Amino acid sequence: MIKIAPSILSADFANLERDIQRVSSADYLHVDVMDGAFVPNITIGVPVVKSIRACTDMLLDVHLMVEKPVRYVEAFARAGADMLSVHLEADHPTRIAEALRIMDDCGVKKAVALRPITKAEAVLPYIDQLDLVLVMTVEPGFGGQAFMDSQLDTIRKVRAIIESRNPACELEVDGGIAPGTAPLVAGAGANVLVAGSAVYGAADIPAAIAALRGAV
Ligand code: DX5
Ligand code: ZN
């Protein structure tokens, strides 16, 4: 079954609670944390995640676009994240493994994220223990960018790895997902679709979420 994860990056941060309630028909709430170093943009941090936790029961899918994310895993877990994704490019493999160990200790779901430049095979050392792999379909950093068709191949390869090693693991895609691109990524094997501008830019948000599901 396809799941939709609206990204609050495209919400109105001055009306965040209202904009979170507006996407309550979706499956996960995608929260983009950016540090101004791993990516050029700066967004939100631990206190905001804590406040979001207090106003929704949706699964909080926290996408850490930060350097050396191992430093922050425990804090985001304590703030109420249900799942944390760390970028494989953000630290040495031993510290990515350490970040996953801390997630285990904290009882949160474990995910790794891949920038477009990163090959599908990079998930191999971690795949057996993951709940989700996040494949970026734009360069991380900003909402509203154009979908990169070249990532369909990576999605297919990650799906094949998941099927052979850990079929329960989910495959999420993030960036440029709209009714036109949703069938492409679903056809390539994605089952969780992040969407920021396609959801929050719509006049009728529940209809936009339904349209993304229906497009697949
Ligand atoms: C980009 C973020 C995305 C972003 C997606 O770095 O990780 O989650 O919000 O926005 P859209 O759906 O507008 O491409
Ligand atoms: Zn994201």
Image: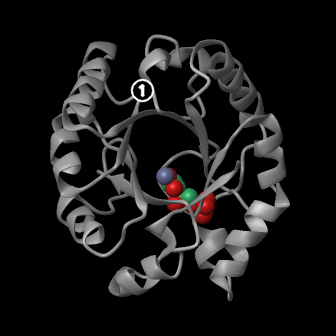
For the point 58% across and 77% down, the residue is: 200
- The answer to whether residue 187 is left or right of residue 45 is right
Q: What residue do we see at 47% from left, 16% from top?
A: 128
x, y percentage for residue 154? 69, 27
Does residue 179 appear anywhere in the picture? no
Above or below, comparing residue 2 to residue 209 in the picture: above
**Quarter location, residue 176:** bottom right
Q: Is residue 125 left or right of residue 192?
A: left
Q: Kindly identify the amino acid type of the residue bearing the numbered disc 1.
A: Leu
The color scheme shown is one colour
- Name the residue tied to disc 1: 88
- Tell me the quadrant of ligand 1: bottom right
Q: Secondary structure at mark 1?
A: loop
**Would residue 191 be found to the left or right of residue 170 on screen?**
right
Is residue 130 shown above or below 38? above
Residue 53 vertical position relative to residue 84 in the rendered view, above or below: below
